Amino acid sequence: EPEVTQTPSHQVTQMGQEVILRCVPISNHLYFYWYRQILGQKVEFLVSFYNNEISEKSEIFDDQFSVERPDGSNFTLKIRSTKLEDSAMYFCASSGPLLDTEAFFGQGTRLTVV
Amino acid sequence: AQKVTQAQTEISVVEKEDVTLDCVYETRDTTYYLFWYKQPPSGELVFLIRRNSFDEQNEISGRYSWNFQKSTSSFNFTITASQVVDSAVYFCALESGSSNTGKLIFGQGTTLQVKP
């Protein structure tokens, strides 16, 4: 069964460093998302991406964050100058090919900023 | 404003008991979608069901059933004859039909513990 895969599963980084979280969405999906879950809290929307551009972003998704689809398969989230409060589980999701279909999530990347 | 409320923070039951997880949503849209996801201890989010606002028919899938009532803006989830493997955090989520982006708004989640 097709699945969304994320790498790495766990990333530890020093405060102030840049990190790139990687995702390979399901191959025929056209809509891509990043969500964040701070430990013990709810899942929060960060950004949606379609047709090589951001379609919606939340207040959390400020200039520190960026997304990219550098090739036909990967979808990345870059966090510049990480802060302690960026520590969370980051989930990638994809849906499609039509918009009104369920999103499937990857297993998540646990980011720990020290 | 769009909002999902899962008032039950934690529920503990003994195996084989039935359990209902509540979900109440708020939206002004006439077209919207409701979801349930399961997050087991391993951390991933597992899709369980998607329901559109025009389909109020209840759904049953094995031991799982869902009761969608627009009159009370609720989309409750029942597990019949619960098992230890059902222990997880369960999230209800809402997608606005007018967003055109697929963004999901999640509730706070309900932690279900099923004891043997």
Image (spheres, rainbow, N blue to C red):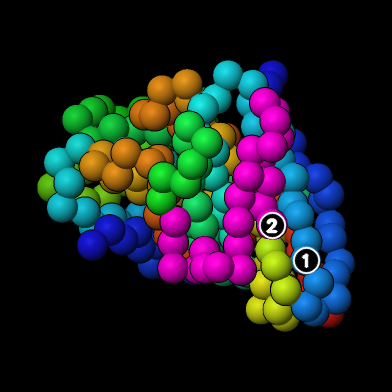
What residue is rendered at 44% in x and 56% in y? A57
Residue A105: numbered disc:
none
Residue visible at 24% across and 42% down? Answer: B98
Q: Is residue A43 visible?
A: yes
Which numbered tag is attached to residue A18?
Answer: 1
Compute the Cα span from label 1 to label 2. Answer: 7 Å
Upstream in sequence: badge 1 or badge 2 = 1
Task: State the residue position of label 2.
Answer: A78
A68 left or right of B41? left
Q: What residue type is labelled 1?
A: Glu
Q: Give the range drawn in magenta.
A: A57-78
Residue B26 forms part of the magenta stretch: no
Image marks 1 and 2: residues in contact by CB distance under 8 Å: yes
Specify the quadrant of the image occupied by residue B34.
top left
Residue A75 on the magenta span: yes
Q: Where is residue A6 in the image (x, y as percent from the top left)?
A: 75, 42
Residue A81, image x and y in percent? 72, 74
Q: Residue at x 85, y 76 (%)?
A: A14
Q: Which chain carries label 1?
A: A
Amino acid carrying mark 2 in the image: Lys
Q: Tell me the element at label 2.
A: strand
